[in-house]
């Protein structure tokens, strides 16, 4: 069972209120990780049948996005792109195209620390089987990592890769997008209080029984502990950590966040959490700041007034962005 990066202090059980209002919750596996939804139905709208239908819609939405964006599914739109865009311009859905546009913006903003073409080498890592690419492969494949070789044509929503060896992967941004999409479904049902998470990405809609949600950021080296708790409402928070998918070989940790400049795992820090309203951007920024490390990563977040960060360095010290330093 894959652990949630963020564990919540608040009770996860279904809570009934004297008025009949109720919290509902469900946990399920999707997108190669664990997802969790919790929402509040007031006495007027409360019914188990209704809650079940909402949960079914959330599961369907997560699975739909997994079908479209998984690099492990041969039939996904993303896999099709990886097979064909090196050869010709490929028309993609509006949804995938707009996610590629967001990814491009973050790449530009981060001078390439965030780069979905990391996958040109990234696909050679298998963390469960402890497999990593050889130095020779990395040296030869490194030119295929370059977000600038993704050509996005807004006129017809087509995508072309300039380099035939280029591959992309949306693992650093898709979960943020997916939970945002699920929150929209909950809102369309009139829901005003909810939590939606997938792996290390969480959105808190409204508050929880009149109080902020208390979100725990996992201790990077101690599974049972949290490093810190943050009170939040109406925000998204995303944590990128080197403990999520990794193996250790000869004392070196090989994990799933790759420095696009080297094709090797990024090792300047061990955990980065980013907080802000836009879950897709928050997701991408946590991966970005992880690659950049403490100094540059924090400088980037401090230059963006709408986003905050908590970075845990290699000595397990906590660092807070300017807006969190009270
Ligand atoms: P997160 O847990 O959101 O930080 O995302 C980590 C995931 O992002 C990895 O599993 C990869 O799929 C993807 N990824 C790794 N390195 C990069 C990078 N430099 N730029 C963009 N995506 C990346
Ligand atoms: Mg991320």
Image (cartoon, grey):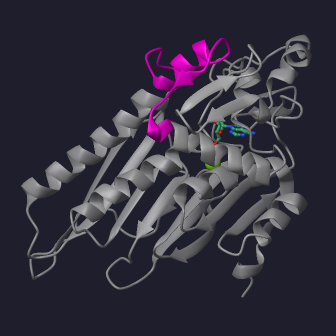
Q: In terms of image quadrants, where is residue 117?
A: top right
The residue drawn where x is 68% and y is 20% is 123
User: Residue 324: x, y in percent?
Assistant: 70, 80
User: Which residue is more in the foreground, 263 or 131?
Assistant: 263
Let me know if residue 315 appears in the view: no
Q: Assess whether residue 81 is covered by the magenta stretch.
A: yes
Q: In terms of image quadrants, where is residue 258?
A: top right
User: Residue 100: x, y in percent?
Assistant: 60, 39
Ligand 1 resides in the quarter of the picture at top right
Quarter of the picture holding the C terminus:
bottom right
Label tally: 0
**In this picture, which residue range is highlighted in magenta?**
72-96
Let me know if residue 139 appears in the view: yes
Quarter of the picture holding the N terminus:
top left
Please, is residue 256 above or below residue 140 in the view?
below
User: Residue 206: x, y in percent?
Assistant: 38, 75
The residue drawn where x is 8% and y is 62% is 47
User: Which residue is more in the foreground, 294 or 3?
Assistant: 294
Question: Does residue 202 appear left or right of residue 51 in this picture?
Answer: right
The residue drawn where x is 85% and y is 66% is 299
Question: Does residue 10 appear left or right of residue 136 in this picture?
Answer: left
Q: Assess whether residue 184 is covered by the magenta stretch.
A: no
Question: Does residue 122 appear left or right of residue 297 in this picture?
Answer: left
Q: In terms of image quadrants, where is residue 317?
A: bottom right
Seen from this angle, which residue lies furthest bottom? 326
Question: Does residue 187 appear left or right of residue 83 in this picture?
Answer: left
The residue drawn where x is 66% and y is 11% is 87
User: Residue 209: x, y in percent?
Assistant: 31, 81
Please, is residue 152 above or below residue 286 in the view?
above
Seen from this angle, which residue lies furthest front? 155
Please, is residue 181 above or below residue 93 in the view?
below
């Amino acid at each position: 069972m894959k652990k949630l990066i963020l564990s919540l202090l608040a009770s996860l059980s279904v809570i009934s209120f004297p008025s009949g209002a109720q919290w509902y919750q469900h946990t399920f596996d999707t997108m190669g990780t664990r997802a969790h939804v919790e929402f509040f139905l007031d006495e007027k709208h409360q019914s188990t049948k209704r809650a079940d239908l909402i949960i079914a819609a959330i599961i369907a939405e997560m699975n739909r996005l997994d079908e479209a964006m998984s690099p492990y599914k041969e039939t996904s739109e993303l896999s099709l792109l990886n097979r064909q865009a090196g050869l010709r311009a490929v028309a993609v859905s509006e949804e995938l195209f707009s996610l590629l546009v967001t990814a491009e913006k973050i790449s530009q903003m981060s001078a390439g620390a965030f780069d979905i073409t990391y996958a040109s080498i990234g696909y050679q890592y298998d963390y469960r089987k402890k497999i990593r690419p050889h130095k020779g492969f990395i040296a030869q494949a490194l030119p295929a990592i370059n977000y600038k070789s993704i050509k996005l044509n807004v006129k017809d929503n087509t995508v072309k890769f300039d380099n035939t060896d280029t591959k992309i992967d949306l693992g650093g941004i898709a979960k943020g997008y997916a939970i945002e999409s699920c929150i929209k479904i909950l809102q369309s049902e009139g829901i005003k209080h909810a939590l939606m998470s997938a792996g290390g990405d969480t959105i808190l809609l409204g508050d929880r029984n009149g109080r902020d949600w208390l979100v725990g950021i996992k201790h990077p080296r101690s599974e049972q502990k949290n490093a810190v708790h943050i009170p939040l409402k109406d925000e998204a928070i995303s944590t990128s950590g080197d403990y999520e998918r990794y193996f250790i070989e000869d004392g070196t940790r090989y994990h799933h966040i790759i420095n696009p400049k080297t094709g090797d795992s990024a090792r300047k820090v061990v955990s980065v959490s980013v907080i802000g309203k836009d879950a897709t951007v928050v997701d991408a920024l946590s991966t970005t700041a992880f690659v950049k490390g403490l100094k540059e990563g924090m400088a980037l977040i401090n230059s963006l007034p709408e986003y905050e960060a908590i970075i845990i360095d290699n000595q397990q010290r906590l660092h807070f962005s300017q807006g969190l330093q009270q």
